[in-house]
Image (cartoon, grey):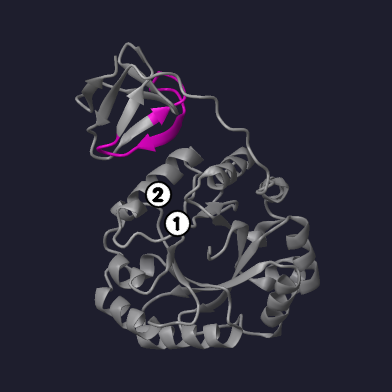
Amino acid sequence: MSIFSGKGTYLWNISSLFRGNVSAIVDCLVDARVSTVCAKIHDAAWSKWDNAQMAELQAGCLQHGITFGLYGYIYLYDPAAEAKYARKMIDKYQPAFYVIDAEGQAKGKFSQAQTFANGMAGTSVPVGLASYRYPSLHRELPWKQFRSVCQFDSPQVYYRNGSPSYNLVRSMNEYDAFKPRLPYLPAGDMYSEFGLEPTADAVTEFLSLCRDNEAIDGCLMWVADQKNRVPLLWDAFASFDWDSTTPPPPPPAPALWKGRVQARLGLRVRLEPSTSSSVIGLIKYGSIVDVLDVLGDWAQIATGWICMRQGIWTYVVNIS
């Protein structure tokens, strides 16, 4: 049974949406066919969110069949107190799940993270980790300590830098390398910050990629609070039908031969056989794929085109 499924959203501050009118918030979530809400409940060992509005929001969500989760931002200033407070909020609200949001303030604090993990061991609800999309770029985060008490990963896969597909595939590949491998329930990007924001098409593409990937049961989008600030992004999210089915792809063409990817960081898949074409995916190191056609230095595979230059491609076997 999945921890949560379908399209969900984070809610950072109840008072920032509809001026804190919880009934209006719930109606908005229902109209958008939101399946899951993850609401902030604390910063470190302190909370302004533990109030009557939170209880009302939880009751309203549950009344309409919306899965209700909570998250807290972890600083590790006083890890034992932070874990104790997180446990207190979990025991009080008994959410469907709880998410540890650990980012820059937690970097390098390995012993403190272990103290926090010790305090979180044996929680009554599933725990997830929300952090960076690419662990390889943030090795100083205490991944092992945090994930020792987690039952799922929920990385922040933000794609305002380009292709949702590339970001999601690379993120999944990196999290797939973790041991143990946990269910992957990513967070998407539908907000504006520092003058930057994704496009509405990117929001739709990300949701489609998550829905159509058998390894992903659901996703959480950051953040419902900005419904009025970036209405086009919210509209793209709200109008997306997670339950719709896509027609099956046509049968693949017969392969010419197989090849193995030798690039350590993987090989980008492009829409067309050109380095200026859009990146639509990533094939990880060591993967063996069927080659359907060859055009110069480019090989066509089932999902697009990959480049065979610079020794990143090894011929394996001729199919014929």
Residue 29 falls within the magenta-colored stretch: no
Q: Residue 41 at what x, y percent from top left?
A: 57, 78
The answer to whether residue 308 is above or below residue 15 is above
Amino acid marked by disc 1: Tyr
Q: Quadrant of the C terminus?
A: top left
Apparent side of residue 234 relative to residue 42 in the rendered image (left or right): right
- The residue where tag 1 is placed is 184
Q: Reading the chain from its start, which is encountered first: label 2 or label 1? A: 2
Magenta region, residue range: 269-287
What is the residue that sits farthest to the top in this orientation?
296
Apparent side of residue 76 relative to residue 54 in the rendered image (left or right): left
Is 242 in front, or is 26? Answer: 242
SS class of the residue under badge 1?
loop
Quarter of the image for residue 89 reads bottom right
- The residue where tag 2 is placed is 172
Q: CA distance from mark 2 to mark 1?
A: 7 Å
Quarter of the image for residue 63 reads bottom right
Assign the magenta stretch its main secondary structure.
Answer: loop
Residue at image x 40%, y 75%?
75
Number of labelled discs? 2
The circle drawn on residue 56 is: none
Apparent side of residue 53 relative to residue 138 in the rendered image (left or right): right
